[in-house]
Image: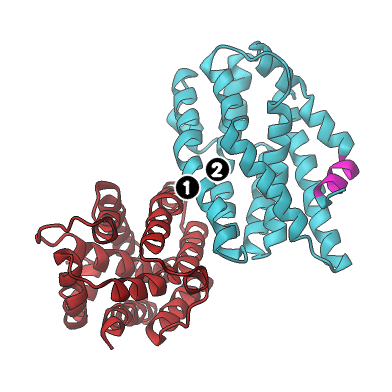
Chain colours: A red, B cyan
Amino acid sequence: MTFVDRLKTANSQSWNAAVEHRFVHELFAGTLNDDRLAGYLVQDYQFCDAYVALLGAATASAPDLATRLPFARQLGAFAGAEDDYFGNSFDELQVPAEQRSKPVLRPATAEFIALMTSAGQSRSYPHALAVLVVAELLYRDWATSTLPWPDAPKHRGWLEVHNNPDFNAWVDWLVEQLHTHAPTLDSLRDDVAATFARAVELELAFFDACYS
Amino acid sequence: MTFVDRLKTANSQSWNAAVEHRFVHELFAGTLNDDRLAGYLVQDYQFCDAYVALLGAATASAPDLATRLPFARQLGAFAGAEDDYFGNSFDELQVPAEQRSKPVLRPATAEFIALMTSAGQSRSYPHALAVLVVAELLYRDWATSTLPWPDAPKHRGWLEVHNNPDFNAWVDWLVEQLHTHAPTLDSLRDDVAATFARAVELELAFFDACYS
């Protein structure tokens, strides 16, 4: 069992609740209403800054060039495709500019941004990985559901971003990195596990906030 | 006059000596001998790790998402095209694997790596920019010479990497960033200027080392 398998198991209740969330089912079914989707995307977009900063910090704290390059590729991919999806969907959903850039943050959003920022500023490669693995693997877990895909680009595009060969390989690589670079010292390992657990909780709270 | 214009002027002797270096003339003329080119590329390749880490640190220390994204794109581009050029050229020049990854570092190489690393670890956005502007703008300055281009991929490829529309736009953007984010406090500004000057000296020393 890898380190990540153990962490997933230890947090399986929240993990599965997020992966099987009503939001996910409605997204696949294409029944997610526009207000809810717009509210979700606006909040999710607020992570982009902290997420890109965290990828940058991981690039800087990774042990060598071979390990830095996958982060570099992911940064390049993010700056292209994912940023495009947000822009196109905001246009289609007629989200005003101010709402895109300066919305009121929901508590789960603000707390997740704080977690990403602190993981990046820690300069600790395993802490950065713990947050990234949750953010990416949990999303891949629901996006690789066997449900049929919706047609509308606003729904389908979000699946395409989180289930495609490049993304899937990137997530496998992240998981393997966290296994390889898990701290051997118990106290540090517990710290990384706590960061992982907090990130899972926040992912679930982030979906829940769409229905409260 | 922008901040970068003033820094270039203050270091014009070394800057011009690098841009007009014998190495550059031989590269354009296609007369650079293979041993010299291989030696140069092996040393240059040793920067990649510190350069990618520095771009990561700049991504993390940049002030906002709009400013992080160009670094993200450059990281993506670097992980693709530039890394390919090295691999292909090393193959063609029959550089052994150990020589690619663990050569004896020339003094200018070791000192430039130290400068990049310290700029990245400073978490100071203007310091990171000072090193990046020298590394990129000085290369663009010689690569945009009006001399005719050589045919062999091992020569031409190095020009293509440093003179193409994406690279040229990236360098313009870096220059503008350093102008915008130049510290206003004199002592910090002097620090950034000293980092810039040191980087220019090392670029010249790096070319000189190919002929010593």
Q: Residue at x 16, y 67 (%)?
A: A1
Q: SS at mark 1?
A: helix
Q: Is A30 drawn above or below residue B179 in the view shown?
A: below
Instruction: Provide residue A31's location: percent of width, then percent of height.
Output: 17, 69
Chain at numbered mark 1: A
B173 in the magenta segment: no
Instruction: Provide residue B87's location: percent of width, then percent of height.
Output: 45, 29
Relative depth, front residue between A156 and A17? A156
Relative depth, front residue between B38 and B86? B86
- Amino acid type at circle 1 is Leu
Relative depth, front residue between B76 and A20? A20
Measure the alpha-carbon separation of dots 1 and 2: 7 Å
The C terminus of chain A - image quarter: bottom left
The chief SS type of the magenta part is helix
Q: Residue at x 59, y 33 (%)?
A: B165
The residue to which callout 1 is attached is A65
Instruction: Provide residue A53's location: percent of width, then percent of height.
Output: 51, 64
The residue range painted magenta reads B4-11
Chain at numbered mark 2: B
Residue B96, image quadrant: top left
The residue to which callout 2 is attached is B48
Q: SS at mark 2?
A: helix
Q: Is residue B107 visible?
A: no
